[in-house]
Image (tube, helix red, strand yellow):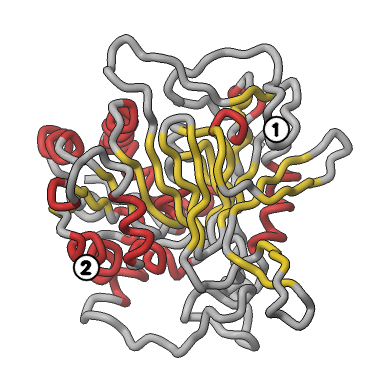
Amino acid sequence: MVLIPRHRASSASLSMSSSGSIVPCPTFRKPFIRHNNPITPTNKLKGFFAGSGSDSMSNPYMARAVVDLVDCSSPRDVSLLYIGTASYDIPKFRRNQTNAFIDLGCDVTSLDVANQRPDRDEMEEAVDNADIILVSGGNTLYALDRWRYLGLDDLLRTAAERGTVMAGGSAGAICWFDSGHSDSADPETYRLYKLGKFKDGEPEKKAGSNNNPFAYYSGNAQEGDSKEDWSYIKVEGLGIWPGMVCPHYDRIQSNGSPRMDDFDRMLEQFGQYELGLGIDHNAALEVNGDEFRVVSIPGEPGSVPVSSNQEENGTTFVPGVWLKYVDEKGDVQKRVCPRSGSLSDLLQEVNDPEKHILLDERVDLCRKENPLLRD
């Protein structure tokens, strides 16, 4: 384990836990409470963090929810900046994750930095002009490393401080938090593999179904397929919001390991002090200042049990968000996140980031296997 510093925007310092906390707040964490920043006119952090990238951001219902976070009278007045670094700026993924916003009338532009290096002024102008910054799904580790190398990470933090809506699914959800449960060690997410695969356009997609709430979320893997030899890793995020995020919480990928189960193992090993947030594939956590709500795609399956007289066993499963933490005995506890509430009752940040936030050393091997473009 490696201890790492954090770079989160300032928050109020509390010595005691909030009585309204949704899950217990131990002495090494405190509720995440924003206070007025005298430098900027707003203290309203806004975000939309989905469990999937393309599936969520291509959905008109989810796209509208993102746009509604912007203080404007019409989507036609909204400027959206797409950053597809995690999917290596491949056009297919840009189209998938922006078409729903274009259909709403948003002005959509992109900032491509995965395979080229814009100058600082170009990056600043693109970020400054955006009402929404939408980050693609893909390889979280590569995207964050590339942003840090180019200095884009600081521009994104500044944008969040002034009230820009920070959005995305999968990698585009992890990146805004302290850390995340990531598939960045999957060789099929590596840069050269992806660029080669999409060199001649879109490859034929295998048939797949998301009707089973515990099915593989990707069309590249099906029940009965041989399991690939790779492991989930913990990746350090930008730290704008606290916590460890697990997207695709109710899904299984090509390594055959259910993400909800592997998330427990990661919390036990690397996240003993952090609060975990498991976001189902068809759900999102929306943040608007000190308010939050859980948004889900209507009619899609999930992992949250709900009583229903229409089902034979009286229970159906809908998309949602789970809160997870390691208790004093070292056991992982979980609770379904309420559908809405106060963000200070939901999120908790560690008191001593240098001591309480641990980094997975396996990221170093992943960086060697998927080397960063340095130009």
Residue at label 1? 273
Badge number at residue 91? 2
Residue that appears at 40% across and 63% down:
56
Where the N terminus falls, by quadrant?
top right
**Mark 2 surroundings: few (<14), some (14-19) or many (≥20) residues within 10 A:** few
Residue that appears at 42% across and 56% down:
169
Q: Quadrant of residue 162?
A: top left
- Mark 2 vs mark 1, CA separation in Å: 39 Å
Residue that appears at 71% across and 80% down:
311
From this viewpoint, is residue 192 visible? no
Q: Quadrant of residue 329?
A: top right
What SS does tag 1 mark? loop
Location of residue 120 in the rendering, given as x and y in whole percent from the top left corner? 15, 34
Location of residue 100 in the rendering, given as x and y in whole percent from the top left corner? 26, 65
From this viewpoint, is residue 305 visible? yes
Task: Give whichever of 365, 188 is nearer the camera.
Answer: 188
What SS does tag 2 mark? helix
Residue type, numbered disc 1 = Tyr
Residue that appears at 57% across and 76% down:
216
Location of residue 165 in the rendering, given as x and y in whole percent from the top left corner? 32, 40
Task: Give whichever of 370, 85 is nearer the camera.
Answer: 85
Q: Is residue 322 positioned above or below 52 on the image?
A: above
Where the C terminus falls, by quadrant?
top left
Residue type, numbered disc 2 = Pro
Q: Is 314 displayed left or right of 375 in the figure?
A: right
Q: Is residue 180 positioned above or below 299 on the image?
A: above
Image marks 2 and 1: residues in contact by CB distance under 8 Å? no
